[in-house]
Amino acid sequence: MAWDSSSFPEFNSDCSSLLRRYLSKQLFEQLQNKVTASGFTLAQAINSGVVNQDSNIGVYAGDAESYRLFDTLFEPIIFDYHGFSANDIHRSDLNQEHLSAPNPDPAGQFILSTRIRVGRNVADLPLGPAITREQRNLIESQVAASLRDLSGELAGTYYPLLGMDETVRNQLVADHFLFKAGDRFLDAAGLNRDWPEGRGIFHNREKTFLVWVNEEDQLRIISMQQGGDIEAVFSRLMTAVKEIEKSVAFMFDSRLGYLTSCPTNLGTAMRASVHIRLPQLATDMTAFKKITDAHQLQIRGIDGEHSESVSGIFDISNRRRLGVTEVECVQDMYNGVVALIKREKQLE
Ligand code: ADP
Ligand code: DAR
């Protein structure tokens, strides 16, 4: 559904996005003629949430300036989602030695796999929604070159999406290694322009270390493996992030941390998740959500965001990403998973 961006958008009565909650007609009129240096407008920032009325958030930034120029819209959304106010300052802790998270399921009865990812964007360029085709291709070539220099466990190969065999691509997606194509939320945010050019995936032979290039963010740096050895997954990721940052300058703000196209990923841009089998709790989602809410966890389906759980298997991850450190993100997830497993055992 296209909308006439010269007038205040209409929202369905059942639209519950943060965009709808915080974009008043007055604010729309105050911001609608503002344009960032890379040409990004309010209409572009909110288009996804207007076109997709089932959005949870509904806004995307086109560049670092968006967070300043449209701050009267972004700040209330940031506070609502992260509990992070104008006086708060984000803190980083990328030191894997600070995490204490011994495998909560050494027998492998519940946790199928662990995955921890961070989003990163390249400094001094626009974000995905406002980037040009040339800038996106430049990022692909620069990032692929820096990844080729990785050694040891992180050594691997970059595979451009352009020209990738469709069977290979579908299998990577099915195996949870690669992003889906054609996400309508990203599409309406301008993140799928020129698809699949400039997009790709880097991974090591074991597929325990992967980097998505130019999807929702310009890098999604991912560590993952079967089982619940959360410390090993986190350690691999922290080593990789620090290694890549030696050759790629990341977009960073002293207050908001690492900047991302979606405000839900600001700060650490980290999502630490387990795929976990909880068949008893699956029969009582009220009790399930009481535990995940208490530990600030997010429940996703087994194919990631906007998907369903299958056979009592859920994707459980930290919800907070800004105003908490990387170690605290993983600790949030760990503490919640320990509580979920304890309750599941009581219900058995
Ligand atoms: P992101 O985590 O990057 O925001 P999604 O939620 O869409 O993106 O997940 C991306 C892919 O990663 C999906 O295929 C999802 O099933 C997979 N995934 C997420 N967490 C895990 C996990 N703990 N184990 C295996 N695959 C996972
Ligand atoms: N689907 C959009 C974005 C929500 C957060 N997830 C991201 N950034 N992948 C929405 O507004 O629901």
Image (spheres, helix red, strand yellow):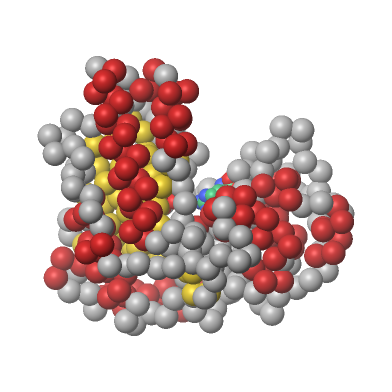
**Does residue 334 appear anywhere in the picture?**
yes
What x and y, as percent, mark residue 264? 54, 54
What residue is shown at x 67% (from left), y 47% (from top)? 18
What x and y, as percent, mark residue 186? 57, 53
- Is 141 positioned to the left or the right of 57 in the image? left
Compared with 300, 97 (above or below) is below
Please count the marks in the image. Answer: 0
- Is 348 positioned to the left or the right of 160 in the image? left
Towards the viewer: 161 or 277: 277
Compared with 133, 78 (above or below) is above
Compared with 30, 77 (above or below) is above
Task: Give the quarter of the image for residue 162.
Answer: bottom left
What residue is shown at x 32% (from left), y 19% (from top)? 280
What residue is shown at x 19% (from left), y 69% (from top)? 155
What x and y, as percent, mark residue 278? 31, 27
What residue is shown at x 38% (from left), y 79% (from top)? 248
- Is 229 positioned to the left or the right of 14 in the image? left
Q: Furthest-front residue in view?
A: 87
Towards the viewer: 71 or 250: 71
Question: The N terminus lies in which quarter of the figure?
Answer: top right
Question: The C terminus lies in which quarter of the figure?
Answer: top left
- Is 318 positioned to the left or the right of 202 in the image? right
